[in-house]
Image (cartoon, rainbow, N blue to C red):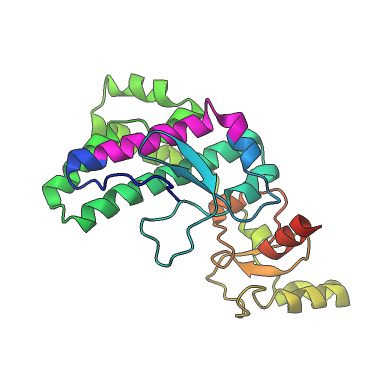
Amino acid sequence: MEGIPHPIPRTVEEVFNDFKGRRSGLIKALTTDVDKFYQQCDPEKENLCLYGLPNETWEVNLPVEEVPPELPEPALGINFARDGMQEKDWLSLVAVHSDSWLLAVAFYFGARFGFGKNERKRLFQMINDLPTIFEVVTGNVKQLKDQSANHNGSSKSKSSAKSRQSEPQSKMVKMSPPSKDEDESGEEDEEDDEQGATCGACGDSYGTDEFWICCDICERWFHGKCVKITPAKAEHIKQYKCPSCSSKRARV
């Protein structure tokens, strides 16, 4: 998605500088440029991604068409969740996915150019010394700095990981297809069960070990992986629209 070609980073320092540039661009999108970013993420548009560029800028755009892509791709369809939750929760969700994408890009370069164990460790330490985008967006940076006065970097990392793990789990009851044991209430429930027994995207049958989500518009059930919705993301969605229903509304 980068219209202007950028030099390919080949050393640890170059990869870290690339990371910092992309990170700065993403932070701008989610803080100082948040109004512009919010407007560009129209839920009526197709699947959109937030890209951070090495020159400290950002852009919202469609995913690349080439498969596999030249670089790892950011989270797809961030615009669909925009109106389904509070703005601060949506920005936090985008921030988490942006942090994951930055690490994926950095270590993609590391793998591509044969970074060894020590180089990968040094790269991660350099990255880990910076607050995550999530910490910046949610205002947790000051708290982490205070903790660092009494703890080393490793302890700080463990503390951050623990706080994220303690976040509420997704509403699996709401997001799982109805079981056939629940259809005693009448024929309508029986029809819903039959409809929910197969994925509206791939057509495969329901499996108890898989995450599913129901469209609030057409009431069809989908594998989370088929519509790129994770349990964590589903937790913040008040009204879920499947890609088909979203595209139908866009054409009206």
* Residue 103 vertical placement versus 229 (above, below): above
Please identify the quadrant where the C terminus is shown: bottom right
Q: Position of residue 221 (x, y in %)?
A: 68, 69
Q: Is residue 22 magenta?
A: yes
Residue 57: image location, x then y, percent: 44, 35
Between 195 and 171, the one nearer to me in the picture: 195
Q: Which residue occupies 47% across, 46% down?
A: 97
125 in relation to 78, above or below = above
In the rendered image, is residue 101 in sight?
yes
Q: Magenta part of the protein: which range?
A: 16-36
- Tell me if 162 is positioned left or right of 151 in this view: right
Residue at figure coordinates x 31%, y 31% from the top left: 130
Q: Residue 139's x, y, as percent? A: 48, 25
Decide whether residue 158 is among the magenta residues. Answer: no
Residue 240 percent coordinates (x, y): 70, 55
- The answer to which of 233 and 48 lies nearer the viewer is 48
Identify which residue is drawn at 42% across, 67% down.
67
Tell me which corner region of the image, top left, top right, bottom left or bottom right, holds residue 228.
Answer: bottom right
What's the residue at 22%, 40% (across, down)? 14
Q: How many marks?
A: 0
Above or below, 216 relative to 151: below
